Image (cartoon, rainbow, N blue to C red):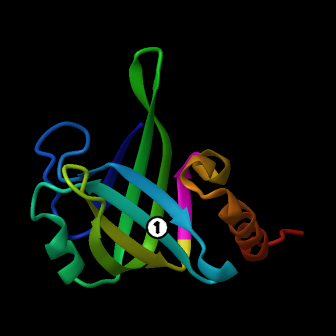
Amino acid sequence: MASYMKIDGLNGPIKDGMYQGWFELESAQIDTPRADLQEIHVIVTKRKGSAVWKPIFQSGGPKNVTIVLKTVEKGSQQEEVRLTLSKARISWYGHSGSGDKVHEVLVFKATQLTFDKGSPAHARLMLRPKDWGTLMATALFNRTAVA
């Protein structure tokens, strides 16, 4: 699964194509810490190999962040999920792993996550199983009723 991220105001290293100015991700995961229905964390990783992400961390926030997840169907990549974090703050930057498998990690904190394409059901692949219920409860509590 290919994943890409765009951070408003920052240019990523992809030089051409549909995702010019974006960042390629190794993974993306939604987390809802301590059953807190008011805050969502999105954890993104990429293989270490450039000094691109440290300046992102130092840039502060809040920033709008778009993440795209693509799957391969019938031999070509299809955009499956597009989600936006509104006014996200970068809460942590660090490294994970060892040896030649070191990843850079960014954690975004946001209070609003919008699915521009796909749905929370599509994102279940990004969630730890214990967080799925909390995310669904957040969606339920935040929805509005129309008479």
User: Can the viewer see residue 37?
Assistant: no
Relative depth, front residue between 80 and 102: 102
Residue at point 10%, 44% (across, down) = 15
Relative depth, front residue between 82 and 40: 40
Please tell me whether residue 113 is drawn above or below residue 75 in the rendered image.
Answer: below
What residue is disc 1 on?
Answer: 42
Q: Position of residue 145 (x, y in %)?
A: 83, 71
Mark 1 crowd level (few <14, some 14–19, many ≥20, 10 Å Cα): many
Residue at point 78%, 69% (across, down) = 140
Residue at point 37%, 61% (across, down) = 44
Let me know if residue 115 is in the magenta part: yes
Residue at point 25%, 50% (across, down) = 101
Most extreme residue toward the right is 147
Please tell me whether residue 75 is drawn above or below residue 63 in the rendered image.
Answer: above
Q: Position of residue 105 (x, y in %)?
A: 31, 66
Most extreme residue toward the front is 99
Look at label 1 and name its amino acid. Answer: Val
Q: Position of residue 56 (x, y in %)?
A: 20, 73
Please tell me whether residue 9 is drawn above or below residue 29 in the rendered image.
Answer: below
Q: Which quadrant of the view contains residue 92? A: bottom left
Q: Which quadrant of the view contains residue 61? A: bottom left
Please tell me whether residue 41 is drawn above or below residue 70 in the rendered image.
Answer: below
Q: Secondary structure at mark 1?
A: strand
Instruction: State the quadrant of the C terminus.
Output: bottom right
Highlighted range, magenta: 113-118
Let me know if residue 25 is in the magenta part: no
Q: Which quadrant of the view contains residue 65? A: bottom left
8 relative to 13 in the view: left or right? right
46 relative to 114 in the view: left or right? left
Q: Position of residue 45 (x, y in %)?
A: 33, 58
User: Can the viewer see residue 91?
Assistant: yes
22 relative to 114 in the view: left or right? left
